[in-house]
């Protein structure tokens, strides 16, 4: 697999270094180098870019701002690896779903580690999307989704494979979710939305029952009029989800 890359940095020496690192990495293809985030944005919207090596402190539009623009406007956005001299931006980098964070000055070994992470991410995404890509119709896609046995979640700076059968319930917390598993005492924390996960999960196995909760239907232990229990946890069924939940129950009672 070859990843198309763009390097963005307003410092000529730093831009040259990142560009040379990209060019000497066999699985990376440098398709553009820019000293302005605005110029880079035009290139990103005109061609398929897989990885963006992005400085943060730049005039006009900084790296964090560019990442936010991409997050809001581009469905197949490139994965971002920040290259910066300022470690105080690490939290902001996490919030915009950056794949990695290289602190200047960094060497080729550190660069290669981040680039390999991008390659592994791309390969995992390609593998997880393969069943859907092979489907020949909308019905076929739906059927494939129901057969999925796992999903990949971004946890810190890596993709973690999670078995659907291991999920008890998922709790939404603003920009994050907590995925509670039967195999672990502590939940997995991922920077994604509950709505995004709801769209990925097979509807025959999972149901959203509250604005803050998705539950695994086969993990429900008991049900009362307005709540359900999974293990020792009671989850209220929200008013807007009661009708759908009642329809689910009507199949069994």
Image: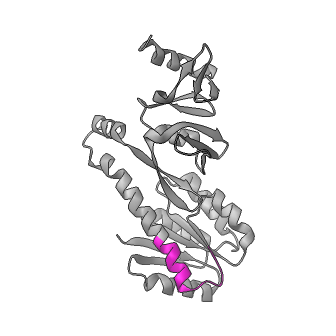
Q: Main secondary structure of the magenta part?
A: helix
Drawn side of residue 87 relative to residue 229, left or right: right
- At a point 47% along the width and 15% down the height, the residue shown is 249
Query: Which residue in the rendered view is the most extreme toward the right?
Result: 88
The furthest residue to the bottom? 13
Q: Report whether 173 appears left or right of 1.
A: right
Q: Is residue 150 above or below residue 46?
A: above
Res. 200 visible in picture: no
Q: Residue at x 35, y 36 (%)?
A: 146
The answer to whether any part of residue 22 appears in the image is yes
Q: Nearer the viewer, residue 142 or 154?
A: 154
Q: Position of residue 135 (x, y in %)?
A: 27, 44
In the image, residue 153 above or below residue 209 = below
In terms of image quadrants, where is residue 238?
A: top right
Tell me the quarter of the image containing the N terminus. bottom left
Residue 107 vertical position relative to residue 153 in the rendered view, above or below: below
Q: Quadrant of the C terminus?
A: top left
Give, as a single range, the part of the protein colored magenta. Answer: 102-116
Residue shown at 62% from the left, 31% from the top: 211
> Is 164 placed above or below 253 here?
below
Q: How many marks?
A: 0
Is residue 221 one of those drawn in magenta? no
Which quadrant of the structure image shows residue 143? top left
Residue at 70% across, 74% down: 57
- In the rendered image, residue 65, in percent from the top left (x then y), is placed at 66, 62
Residue nearest the observer in this picture, 212 or 137: 212
| The furthest residue to the top | 253
Q: Nearer the viewer, residue 162 or 77?
A: 162
**Colour approach in the figure:** one colour
Q: Is residue 247 left or right of residue 222?
A: left
């Amino acid at each position: 697999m070859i990843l198309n890359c763009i390097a963005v940095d307003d410092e000529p020496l730093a831009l040259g270094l990142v560009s040379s690192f990209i060019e000497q990495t066999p699985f990376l293809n440098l398709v553009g180098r820019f000293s302005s985030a605005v110029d880079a944005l035009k290139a990103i919207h005109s061609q398929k870019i897989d990885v963006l090596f992005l400085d943060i402190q730049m005039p006009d539009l900084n790296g964090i701002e560019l990442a936010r623009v991409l997050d809001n406007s581009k469905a197949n956005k490139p994965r971002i690896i920040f290259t910066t001299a300022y470690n105080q931006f690490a939290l902001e980098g996490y919030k915009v779903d950056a794949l990695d964070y290289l602190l200047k000055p960094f060497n080729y070994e550190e660069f290669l580690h981040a680039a390999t992470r991008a390659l592994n991410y791309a390969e995992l995404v390609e593998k997880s999307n393969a069943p859907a890509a092979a489907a020949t119709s909308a019905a076929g896609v739906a059927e494939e989704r129901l057969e999925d046995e796992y999903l990949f979640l971004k946890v810190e700076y890596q993709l973690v494979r999670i078995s659907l059968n291991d999920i008890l319930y998922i709790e939404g917390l603003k920009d994050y979710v907590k995925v509670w598993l039967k195999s672990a005492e502590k939940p997995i924390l991922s920077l994604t939305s509950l709505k995004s996960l709801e769209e990925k999960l097979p509807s025959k196995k999972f149901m959203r029952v509250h604005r803050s909760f998705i539950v695994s239907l086969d993990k429900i232990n008991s049900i009362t009029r307005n709540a359900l229990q999974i293990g020792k946890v009671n989850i209220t069924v929200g008013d807007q989800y009661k009708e759908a939940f009642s329809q689910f129950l009507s199949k069994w009672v």
